[in-house]
Amino acid sequence: MVYDYEYFKKAVYDLTQIDLNAYKEKQMKRRIDTLIAKHGIKGYNNYVTELRTNKSVFEEFVNYLTINVSEFYRNPGQWEILDKEVFPFLIGKYGKNLKIWSAACSTGDEPYSLVMALSKHLPLNQIHIYATDIDKQVLEKARSGLYGEKSIAAVPDEFKKRFFTKVGPSYQISEEVKKQVEFKEHNLLKDVYPRGCHLIVCRNVLIYFTEEAKFEIFGRFYQSLLPGGILFIGSTEQIINHTDIGYKRDNSFFYSRP
C-alpha cells in the first residue's frame, strides 16, 4: 500500500502538477481515501486510471484536493485592522497604485472583499487585485461572481447594498467590483511568484501543508514583497521562526518585510 500511494503521488503530479509530498500525508490521504470510497474504486492504481479517462472524476478530484472553503470578510476583526491600519499605512508609504496579490484565492470571496474594503480609501478605478488559485473550476466560479447568502453574511451592510444584486436565492457581485480583479491560475509550490507586492493576502490555506513547504512558501512571499510590504495570513496560522525568514511580526496575522 505504501508503494501504491507513492505511485499515486507521482501520477497525480504528472496529471495536475500538484505535489502531494508538500501536504500533511495523514490528513491528505484520509481525504483521498474518502473520495475513492465514494466511487467504489479499489486502490490508488485504479483511481489513477479513472482520473485519466473520466473528466468529471478528474475535476471533482482537483476541486476536492484543493480544499475550497471561503467566505467574504472572514474574521471581520482582522479586516478592521486592514481598514484602519494597514491600508492607510500602505497608501501613505507607497501612494495609490498598490500592487496587491490574493494568493490561493479560491472562489473569489477574498479578492472581492479586498476591492470593497479598499473602496473606502481609493476610487474603484484605481484598485487592482491580482488573484490566483491552482484550481481552474473555482477560478471560473470566482469570475462568475455569484454567491450564496452564507458566503456574504459578514459583508458590511453598506457594501451589500452597493455591490450585490439578489438573483433568486443567490447574490451577484457588481461588474464594477469584478473588473478590478485579475484572476489567474497559479501553483504556489511550483510557479514563479509576482514581484514588487505591497500586500499579499494568503489565509487559511497553508495549514494543510507540511512545515517544510510552509517555510518555503512564506520565504517566497517575503521575496515577493517590497521593503515595508505586508503579508496577511489566516487566524488559524502562524509563521514559525518568522525572524529566520526576515519578517517583522506586526500583530498576530500581519507580518511585514522591514
Image (cartoon, helix red, strand yellow):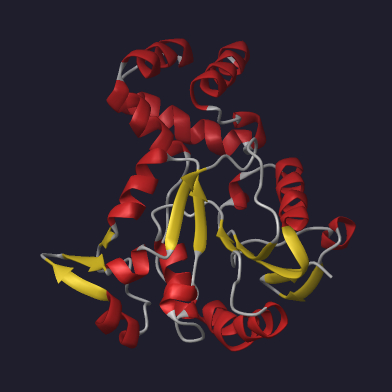
Viewer-side residue, 36 vs 196: 196
- Compared to residue 128, the image places residue 6 above or below, namely above
Q: Position of residue 135 (x, y in %)?
A: 44, 40
Instruction: Looking at this view, name the residue that lies furthest to the right.
Output: 244
Q: Please state the total of marks drawn on the protein image.
A: 0
Q: Position of residue 18 (x, y in %)?
A: 56, 31
Instruction: Looking at this view, name the residue that lies furthest to the left.
Output: 168
Quarter holding the N terminus?
top right
Residue depicted at 84% across the width and 58% down the height: 241
- Compared to residue 237, the image places residue 63 above or below, namely above
Residue depicted at 65% across the width and 80% down the height: 95
Quarter holding the C terminus?
bottom right
Q: Position of residue 38 (x, y in %)?
A: 31, 28
Residue depicted at 76% across the width and 41% down the height: 212
Residue depicted at 40% across the width and 58% down the height: 108
Q: Does the rendering let one see residue 217?
A: yes
Q: Quadrant of residue 59?
A: top left
Q: Position of residue 99 (x, y in %)?
A: 61, 65
Q: Is residue 26 left or right of residue 154?
A: right
Viewer-side residue, 131 vs 122: 122
Q: Is residue 71 left or right of residue 3?
A: left
Viewer-side residue, 84 vs 30: 84
Q: Does the rendering let one see residue 73?
A: no
- Compared to residue 61, the image places residue 146 above or below, namely below
